[in-house]
């Protein structure tokens, strides 16, 4: 069997088991086995598959059929043009969260231009903190997480992208570990309503950490707690950026007005026109 034939069969098996984008998923897993980029793979499709390669590829396809996400299978995920190490102890970074990073970079580049202290709350694998550090050389970032396992992964990603000197990892609850106030707080906290957890895809409900998903009965428990802490952890004229679910914009803005009545509060929509980030400029 050639690589091309193995790829075609794997894509067929994935599709038969309800996996979306089956060809791309099969390609990703085969590239992982072979250590090839996409161009190299497609110039090698006529090569014969070795027994070792066939066995390894088959094992990964079977894992994907059980709905284990490809990002956990390969241990990697791209976010904001950067490659991140992953494990099941952390949430898989989503493309939607790139809007949070873009907004933070915009603020840091136009408002906090001389120096910038940022807190990334609930850092997980460190994707947001590392992306900010890579793109904001004048910024220092505190990245907090309650999970020691998550901080181990984020530490590896800081080293991987050579930003450990500007990203300080802190274990603790929300803003509790911060040693000083910051200019900007960014957070992608759990915002899924408890009743909606059962409706999530098996890739999420069976494999991703519920600690990083569940936002309580209304989805806003962690966001509300963060707002209660934010005021005393912000420097004058600071800002807060919060990722939210598509239907939480109004509720989060109303909550923000209670905590920050004199602030400029707004919602940033994503490329689909859905509410995605709440911005609070104090």
Image: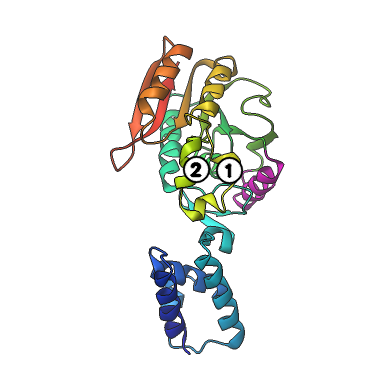
Q: Quadrant of the C terminus?
A: top left
> Dot 2 surroundings within 10 Å: few (below 14), some, or many (20 or more)?
some
Between circles 1 and 2, the one closer to the viewer is 2
Expressed as whole percent of the image width and height from the top left, the position of residue 226 reads 55, 24
Asked whether the viewer can see residue 115, the reply is no
Expressed as whole percent of the image width and height from the top left, the position of residue 158 reads 63, 46
Q: Looking at this view, is 39 or 250 the one in front?
A: 250
> Dot 1 surroundings within 10 Å: few (below 14), some, or many (20 or more)?
some
Rounded to the nearest whole Å, what is the CA distance between mark 1 and mark 2? 9 Å
Asked whether the viewer can see residue 135, the reply is yes
157 in magenta = yes
| Picture layout, residue 95 above or below residue 34 | above
Which is the main secondary structure of the residues drawn in magenta? helix
23 in magenta = no
- Judging by the rendered image, the residue that carries numbered circle 2 is 197
Which residue does the image show at 54% across and 60% down from the upper left?
A: 68
Q: Secondary structure at mark 1?
A: helix
Which residue does the image show at 42% across and 83% down from the upper left?
A: 4
Which residue does the image show at 63% across and 45% down from the upper left?
A: 154
Q: Give the label on residue 210, or none.
A: 1
Looking at the image, tell me whether mark 1 or mark 2 is earlier in sequence order. Answer: 2
| Colour scheme employed for the rendering of this structure | rainbow
| Picture layout, residue 269 above or below residue 14 | above
Expressed as whole percent of the image width and height from the top left, the position of residue 69 reads 52, 59
Stretch in magenta: 147-163
Q: Secondary structure at mark 2?
A: helix
| Picture layout, residue 123 above or below residue 230 | below
Q: Are marks 1 and 2 in contact (CB under 8 Å)?
A: yes
């Amino acid at each position: 069997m050639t690589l091309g034939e193995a790829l075609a069969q794997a894509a067929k098996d994935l599709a038969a088991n309800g996996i979306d984008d089956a060809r791309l998923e099969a390609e990703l897993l085969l590239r992982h086995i072979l250590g090839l980029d996409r161009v190299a793979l497609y110039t090698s499709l006529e090569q014969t598959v070795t027994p070792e390669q066939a066995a390894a590829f088959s094992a990964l396809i079977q894992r994907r059929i059980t709905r284990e996400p490809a990002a956990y299978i390969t241990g990697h995920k791209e976010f904001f043009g950067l490659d991140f190490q992953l494990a099941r102890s952390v949430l898989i970074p989503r493309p939607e969260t790139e809007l949070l990073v873009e907004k933070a970079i915009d603020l840091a580049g136009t408002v906090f231009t001389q120096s910038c202290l940022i807190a990334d709350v609930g850092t997980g694998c460190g994707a947001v903190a590392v992306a900010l550090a890579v793109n904001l050389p004048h910024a220092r970032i505190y990245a907090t997480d309650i999970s020691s396992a998550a901080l181990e992964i984020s530490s590896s990603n800081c080293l991987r992208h050579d930003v450990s000197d500007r990203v300080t990892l802190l274990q603790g609850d929300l803003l509790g570990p911060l040693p000083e106030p910051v200019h900007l707080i960014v957070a992608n906290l759990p915002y899924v309503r408890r009743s909606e957890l059962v409706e999530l895809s098996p890739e999420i409900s069976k494999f991703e950490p519920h600690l990083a998903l569940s936002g309580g009965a209304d989805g806003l428990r962690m966001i509300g707690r963060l707002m209660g802490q934010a005021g005393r952890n912000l420097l004058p004229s600071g800002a807060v950026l919060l990722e939210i679910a598509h239907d939480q914009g109004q509720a989060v803005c109303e909550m923000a007005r209670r905590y920050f009545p004199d602030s400029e509060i707004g919602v940033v929509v994503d490329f689909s026109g859905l509410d995605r980030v709440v911005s609070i400029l104090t």
